[in-house]
Image (cartoon, rainbow, N blue to C red):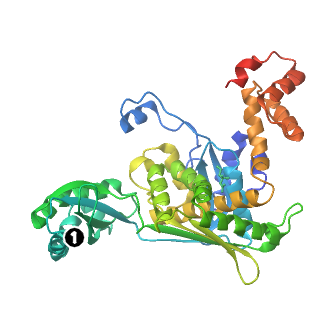
Amino acid sequence: MNTSRIPGFYNLPIHERYPTLVQAAGLTLEELPPFEGGLTPEQADHMVENAVGTFSLPLGIALNFIVNGREVLVPMAIEEPSVIAGASFMAKLARAGGGFFATADAPLMIGQIQLLNLPDLPSARLKILEHKAALLTEANEIDPVLKKLGGGARDLEVRIIPDSPIGGFLVVHLIYDVRDAMGANAVNTACEHLAPRLEAISGGKAHLRILSNLADRRLARARCTIPVDELAFGEFSGEEVRDGIIAAWAFAAADPYRAATHNKGILNGVDAVVIATGNDWRAVEAGAHAYAARSGRYTSLSSWGKDAEGNLTGTLEMPLAVGIVGGATKVHPLAKAALKLMGVQTATELAEVIVSVGLAQNLAALRALATEGIQRGHMSLHARQVAIAAGASGDLIERVASQMVAEKVVRIDRAIEILQALSGQTTRNLGDQSRE
Ligand code: MEV
């Protein structure tokens, strides 16, 4: 990677961005295929049942990221305007403080085996623990490829669920190192394999055998420092912006209604990279929200404060079960290109980039909310979408959009009026448009 700073990238026509990107990434055109086309119908047909086609999303590049001292160009697949611009802008501010510093745990997933029909839960629990070493050895033999790569069973825990709608039962947790995979397949296979052994040892009946998406043994963390002067803009001083961001975070820390939206903003960034790399974003979402509620009260995944010099500091910690092998990561041509562009060598490194993007995205939202509000930033891309919906094409899209932004009226009826004035063309019926 040469640099993640590409001044003027936004203003290039879309077909000129790809060669510019390849050059900035220090790759060749052969090494980085264009982000076009995606899955063929045949590939889609092998992936899901009853496939009839494919569904695409915009793919953009978040610029300016430095993660652990390394320049990273980050691909993001997302339909929402302002997300990619927001992440890029905040990554630029963070550069002045050295970028993002991120760590991630070893790729340990948790597999759960539910054991029913046990009259004496404490004794059954200890019987299983007496066989722990043998059970781990057995679990290690299930996937020789994973074992060769240094993964496999790491630990076994037994939890008593004393009370539930069907009474008490045991839950065995198999802690499994899945290396560079997301790990669902490996863990589910191991759980299904161990279940009969656990039945024999405990005398119970194995019921569910499935991984947990609360991947709290596989956390990723990022922190950044934004020099307070970098935060100043317009009539806002750096201190005002910083304190506004901290007060916005305090709202999320204290109130679940706000925390849900705050964390959604983090996941805007996280999911976009998770999707671009062919990973399972539902798993990441489930893990993030469950982790945010781990204390019994749903709260913010991030925290914001200030250091001794008055600079803004931010942290984010969340489960991130993502892989660079298996699933769609190696099947989907764009996912392969996305991983290539980022230059990540391990799943852990991918998690470190993703958590950094989540923190940047959170900062972008809080900075906007704490100052001029979120709508202003959304306005210009939203205006373009409204202009297109009104029937504008080519140059007219930008002209109609700019006029609406200048007038601060971004509505379909106004877009149609401007379009008619600019082009004299007959547009679609206003009544039809307003119902869309
Ligand atoms: C919108 O997609 C995300 C935000 O609502 C996040 C937030 O409120 O922090 C702007």
Q: Residue at x 52, y 48 (%)?
A: 275
Residue 283 placement (x, y as % from top left): 44, 53
Q: Quadrant location of the C terminus?
A: top right
Identify the image quadrant of residue 130: bottom left
Residue 90 placement (x, y as % from top left): 71, 62
Q: Is residue 304 left or right of residue 378?
A: left
Q: Is residue 289 above or below residue 382?
A: below
Foreground: 37 or 395?
A: 395
Residue 324 placement (x, y as % from top left): 44, 56
Q: Which residue is mark 1?
A: 136
Q: Is residue 217 above or below residue 323?
A: below
SS class, disc 1: helix
Identify the image quadrant of residue 303: bottom right
Q: Residue at x 23, y 62 (%)?
A: 168
- Residue 12 appears in the picture as rendered: no
Q: Is residue 324 left or right of residue 62?
A: left
Identify the image quadrant of residue 363: bottom right
Amino acid type of the residue tagged 1 in the rendering: Leu
Foreground: 125 or 131?
A: 125
Q: Quadrant location of the N terminus?
A: bottom right
